[in-house]
Image: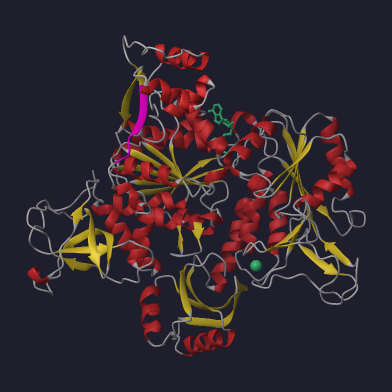
């Protein structure tokens, strides 16, 4: 295990405790506390300490700094009987805090998000049948009571709730039996979440390419030690099957495996597949878990009872005692960038975690981020390639639909050629998907009389019409309001018009064109929770649907063998706006969407509707020339000194008073570090210049790749006084620029 701590306790020396809870304490450093006689403390121990009038939870960080005399220190109140935070985990917290320039306390909070996990685990009440118990006189044996007893005759002990559900009666029936002395109560310790994946189960027979890739990964995991591998393979090449072998190798070593997915809540199909391969489910970690699930999972991970965790980015901060491999699936996905609180990129932090812990990490993608691609080209990362689709499935044919010539009818969005292709696909009994990365009915509502546009009062964003919900919604702050009957500006009635399409509007067009087709929308706001998504995925797999209209929820990872046509309604959508990463991101998204087509025996076709068929992204997609696109993109970034060839960091200045925000942003601009190589651009309105009522300005620091931007920024911020009403967020390596 990666303990690495010097043995021996800190008794009597005054422990240095990093205080991490409750909520955002603006603590820069750890505090010293006294250690009461008889309490043995070691680095990593969780403790309760007094802080001002409060009692808070902290982690012992090391021996005291010795500034205050030991006997004058406030003593630690108690030590929790919980597994300590390992040395690697603590160094990781320090590293992330230093890299992202956030307070260690913030990062610690992510690592320890569930204080209740420190309390002894709660046991659950279950019942057994009491042997040779006799019903007391006058006890009436009803049918329901008999059913409960029968269940326990030959079943394992179960909770009152489980018994009631299985017997189809109320919990009171179960309680009645217990009170009558017919059941034996039993306290069960909580079961570790997830099951015990069996790494000895054989996987599918791998192709030669897959087998070579799997062998390579297995050897790296067995050998241990830090290495980063890019598993680079086209969609459907069997990357998942290959990295399963790396997981199996970690389990074989008695170590844990962590798999990061961009959107775990949407990954029901992934979970099913894992369970089929290993005979048990992994433990999950994401924002949809309940408080008690989080508590049980955290604790079980800390105790080493959980062999495999699959999770969203925050799963990186769980207290693994002995991690053997990290997998980052779809490593290019922007969902790995956390934009609030501590701003970090989970893929980059995962590489750091692997480095600190001395273990292999596998980055998986069919369209790697340019950062990872460049690292693989330069040999910093090892590339393992899977060049073809499994089982001889062909990559889909990609056709460009030039919307300037092939025009949809007025107030419709599907071009004649795409309509024809849809009709042909449906007639052949195959499935089609229309992709549009826009929820709702229409992205803009405008008054035809005066031109007034419905805008969010709190954000730089239009209000999106959701016709099914009969509302206008802001997709940034969640504001909702009814559709106005008259224009709020000029007062005219009946002039408000929906502009442009969202998925709901495409569904309307589809219903008009193909009234008999079984169609459904698949978007995050039409699918409530993992179950609904799972059900939708099942319906598509079982061919209970002919046509799916989806947002990017639909683009990710799914494998639908009957899906042969993918139509992208607006391929240009992501290319508008000034973001220099737009081309890369659009290429990745469209490539991934296209990869949904033709994964089974029948070949697939992809049609991209665009107004700019000559754009390099469209050309590369049509020609299937991924590396050509990357080459061009890399050259452009290199010329501009942009990442990954140069470094960027953003300061985002925000506050409710725009004048004050501007004043601080300008002061920061004047105090900016500048020399021959370091440039500061801005202040300029940040992307989303108004967000949830806060005005935002951005300064962008641009420097050569080897620059320690953190040191520059720290010195920069020292030179400017920031009033309390203003917040300055630091985004090292911003995703958009
Ligand atoms: P990727 O992750 O590269 O998109 P997957 O691992 O999802 O590819 O594989 C695509 C499909 O091919 C899946 O249904 C998978 O089960 C199947 N597949 C991949 N490799 C094999 C294999 N060696 N034997 C049988 N089926 C395989
Ligand atoms: Zn808003």
Which quarter of the frame holds ligand 2?
bottom right
Give the residue at x 26% y 70%: 52
Image point (83%, 61%), residue name: 498
Q: Position of residue 185 (x, y in %)?
A: 32, 25
Q: Is residue 124 magenta?
A: yes
Look at the picture and state if 711 lies above or below 467.
Answer: below
Front-most of 674 and 339?
339
Q: In this image, 272 relative to 91: left or right?
A: right
Q: Is residue 37 visible in this depiction of the protein? A: yes
Q: Position of residue 425 (x, y in %)?
A: 82, 35
682 on left or right of 456? left
User: Outermost residue, front direction?
Assistant: 138
Q: Is residue 622 left or right of residue 59?
A: right
Left or right: where 617 falls relative to 63: right
Please report the residue visible at 46 percent of the width from the left and 17 percent of the height from the top.
148
Specify the quadrant that holds the C terminus.
Answer: bottom right
In the image, what residue occupies the spot 49% across and 82% down? 679
| 523, 4: nearer the viewer | 523
Residue 267, by quadrant, is top right
Q: Which residues are magenta?
A: 121-127
Q: Residue 477: give x, y in percent of width and height.
A: 62, 65
Which of 397/41 is in front?
41
Toward the viewer: 168 or 419?
168
**Residue 212 image-quadrant placement:** top left
Residue 227 is covered by the magenta coloring:
no
């Amino acid at each position: 295990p990666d303990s690495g701590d010097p043995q021996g306790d800190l008794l009597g020396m005054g422990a240095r405790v990093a205080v991490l809870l409750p909520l955002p304490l603006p603590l820069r450093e750890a505090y010293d506390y006294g250690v009461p006689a008889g309490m043995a403390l070691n680095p990593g121990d969780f403790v309760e300490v007094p802080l001002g009038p409060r009692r808070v939870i902290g982690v012992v960080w090391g021996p005291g700094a010795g500034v205050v005399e030991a006997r004058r220190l406030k003593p630690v109140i108690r030590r929790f009987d919980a597994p300590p935070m390992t040395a690697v985990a603590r160094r990781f917290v320090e590293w992330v805090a230093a890299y992202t320039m956030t307070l260690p306390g913030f990062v610690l909070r992510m690592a320890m998000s569930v204080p209740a996990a420190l309390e002894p685990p709660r046991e659950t009440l279950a019942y057994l049948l009491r042997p040779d118990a006799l019903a007391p006189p006058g006890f009436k044996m009803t049918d329901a009571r008999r059913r409960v007893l029968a269940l326990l005759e030959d079943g394992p002990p179960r909770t009152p709730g489980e018994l009631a559900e299985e017997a189809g009666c109320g919990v009171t029936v179960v309680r009645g039996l217990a009170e009558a002395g017919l059941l034996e109560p039993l306290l069960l310790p909580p079961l570790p979440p997830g099951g015990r994946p069996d790494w000895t189960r054989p996987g599918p027979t791998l192709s030669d390419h897959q087998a070579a890739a799997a062998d390579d990964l297995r050897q790296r995991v067995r050998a241990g030690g830090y290495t980063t591998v890019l598993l680079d393979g086209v969609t459907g090449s069997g990357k998942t099957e290959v990295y399963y072998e790396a997981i199996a190798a970690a389990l074989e070593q008695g170590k844990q495996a962590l798999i990061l997915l961009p959107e775990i809540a949407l990954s029901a199909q992934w979970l099913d597949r894992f369970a089929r391969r290993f005979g048990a489910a992994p433990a999950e970690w994401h924002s949809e878990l309940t408080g008690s699930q989080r508590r049980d999972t955290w604790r079980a991970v800390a105790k080493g009872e959980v062999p495999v965790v699959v999770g969203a980015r925050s799963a990186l901060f769980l207290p693994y005692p002995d991690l053997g491999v990290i997998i980052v699936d779809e490593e290019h996905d922007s969902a790995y960038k956390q934009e609030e609180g501590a701003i970090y990129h989970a893929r980059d932090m995962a590489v750091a975690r692997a480095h600190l812990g001395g273990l292999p990490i596998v980055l998986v993608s069919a369209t790697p981020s340019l950062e990872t691609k460049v690292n693989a080209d330069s040999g910093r990362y090892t590339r393992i390639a899977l060049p073809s689709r499994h089982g001889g499935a062909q990559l889909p044919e990609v056709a460009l639909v030039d919307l300037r010539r092939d025009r949809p009818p007025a107030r419709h969005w599907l071009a004649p050629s795409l309509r024809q292709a849809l009709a042909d696909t449906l007639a052949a009994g195959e499935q089609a998907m229309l992709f549009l990365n826009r929820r709702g009915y229409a992205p803009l509502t405008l008054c035809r009389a005066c031109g007034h546009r419905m805008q969010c009062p709190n954000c730089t964003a239009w209000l999106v019409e959701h016709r099914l919900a009969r509302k206008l919604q802001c997709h940034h702050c969640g504001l909702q309001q009814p559709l106005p009957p008259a224009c709020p500006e000029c007062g005219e009635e009946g002039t408000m018009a929906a502009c442009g399409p969202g998925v709901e509007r495409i569904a309307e067009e589809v219903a008009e064109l193909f009234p008999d087709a079984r169609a459904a929308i698949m978007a995050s706001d039409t699918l409530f929770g993992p179950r609904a998504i799972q059900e939708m995925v099942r319906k598509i797999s079982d061919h209970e649907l002919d046509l799916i209209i989806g947002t990017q929820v639909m683009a990710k990872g799914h494998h639908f063998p009957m899906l042969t046509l993918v139509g992208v309604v607006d391929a240009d959508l992501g290319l508008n706006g000034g973001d220099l990463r737009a081309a890369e991101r659009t290429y990745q998204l469209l490539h991934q969407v296209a990869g949904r087509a033709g994964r089974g025996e029948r070949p697939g076709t992809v049609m991209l509707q665009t107004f700019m068929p000559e754009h390099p992204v469209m050309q590369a997609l049509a020609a299937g020339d991924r590396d050509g696109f990357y080459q061009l993109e890399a050259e452009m970034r290199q010329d501009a000194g942009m990442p990954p060839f140069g470094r960027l960091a953003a300061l985002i200045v925000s506050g409710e008073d725009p004048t004050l925000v501007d004043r601080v942003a300008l002061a920061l601009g004047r105090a900016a570090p500048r020399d021959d190589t370091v440039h500061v651009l801005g202040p300029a309105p940040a992307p989303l210049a108004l967000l949830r009522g806060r005005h935002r300005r951005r300064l962008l620091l641009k420097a050569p790749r080897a620059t320690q931007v953190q040191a520059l920024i720290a010195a920069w911020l020292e030179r400017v006084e920031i009033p309390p009403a203003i917040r300055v967020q630091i985004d090292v390596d911003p995703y958009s620029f």
